[in-house]
Image (tube, rainbow, N blue to C red):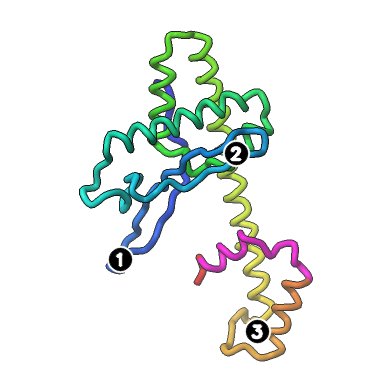
């Protein structure tokens, strides 16, 4: 096929005790439909999706593999149903972002290549382009939010710093109060992006 893996896939990473980073892709199964009622349910860890998941042998049974293919097909079919509405498709992609991994796009390419209908092939190709564009915009928006959060976090910290920009711990009551007052005055910027950035800096 002429499809490529999404530039920035959703993933979960964690630090290993011995050093390095462990990355795994979580399998999600669709359990709803479009028009505002679509939700994604985390598949059981025994389904063997991603490094660190699966049974002791690290392999999947035939039933598990069939179930995963069916889940991907269901998501593709639902995307096709929602593709005429940009709002619905965007909402669906946002809700199912963790499902858009390499295996999903391989299945998408397989379906496109195997269909005998030129009309269906064209619909799938157009859908792939739309989903990739939506995903790309989501990544850009997320990166922008993180950059904004980083700048705001610097402003918060600077309220308790001395003239040279240094912190002296423990902070005095006055310095702590300055930070709290600044955050209260900018409560609209205190969000999940700020919290995630703060944890990343710690």
Q: Which residue is drawn at 27% across and 67% down?
A: 18
Badge 1 crowding class, 10 Å Cα cut-off, few under 14, some 14 to 19, many 20 or more, is few
**For residue 66, what is the image quadrant?**
top left
- Which quarter of the picture shows residue 65? top left
Depicted 16 relative to depicted 113: above or below? below
Magenta residues? 185-199
In the image, residue 82 above or below residue 56: above
Question: Mark 2 vs mark 1: which is more N-terminal?
Answer: 1
- Where residue 55 sits: x, y (%)? 26, 49
Q: Nearer the viewer, mark 2 or mark 1?
A: 2
Residue 154: x percent and y percent? 63, 69
Q: Earlier in the sequence, mark 3 or mark 1?
A: 1
Residue 114 coordinates in the image, percent (x, y):
39, 15
Q: State which mark lies toward you, 2 or 3.
A: 2
**Disc 2 and disc 1 in contact, CB within 8 angstroms:** no
Residue 19's mark?
Answer: 1
**In the image shown, does 194 or 119 lie closer to the viewer?**
119
Element type at mark 3: loop
Where does the image place residue 86, in percent across and percent down from the top left?
Answer: 67, 30
Image position of 98 (left or right of 152):
left
Q: Which of marks 2 and 3 is nearer the N terminus?
A: 2
Tell me whether the residue at label 2 lies in contact with that at label 3, contact meaning CB atoms closer than 8 angstroms: no
Circle number at residue 38:
2
- Residue at the (33%, 38%) spot, across then down: 64
Q: How crowded is mark 3: few (under 14 residues within 10 Å), some or many (20 or more)?
A: few
- The residue tagged 3 is 162
Q: Which of 169 and 56 is in front in this view?
A: 56
Asked whether 190 falls inside the magenta stretch, the response is yes
């Amino acid at each position: 096929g002429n499809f490529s893996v999404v530039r920035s896939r959703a993933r979960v990473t964690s630090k290993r005790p011995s050093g390095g980073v462990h990355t795994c892709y979580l399998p999600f199964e669709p359990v709803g439909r479009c028009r505002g009622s679509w939700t994604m349910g985390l598949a059981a860890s025994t389904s063997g999706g991603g490094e660190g998941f699966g049974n002791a042998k690290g392999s999947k049974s035939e039933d598990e593999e069939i179930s995963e293919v069916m889940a991907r097909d269901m998501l593709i079919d639902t995307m096709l149903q929602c593709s005429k509405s940009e709002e619905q498709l965007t909402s669906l992609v946002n809700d199912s972002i963790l499902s858009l991994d390499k295996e999903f796009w391989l299945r998408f390419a397989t379906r496109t290549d195997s269909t005998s209908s030129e009309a269906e092939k064209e619909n799938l190709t157009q859908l792939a382009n739309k989903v990739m564009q939506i995903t790309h915009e989501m990544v850009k928006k997320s990166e922008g939010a993180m950059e904004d959060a980083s700048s705001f976090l610097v402003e918060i910290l600077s309220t308790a710093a001395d003239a040279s920009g240094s912190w002296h711990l423990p902070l005095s009551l006055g310095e702590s109060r300055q930070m709290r007052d600044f955050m209260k005055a900018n409560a609209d910027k205190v969000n999940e992006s700020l919290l995630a950035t703060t944890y990343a800096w710690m």
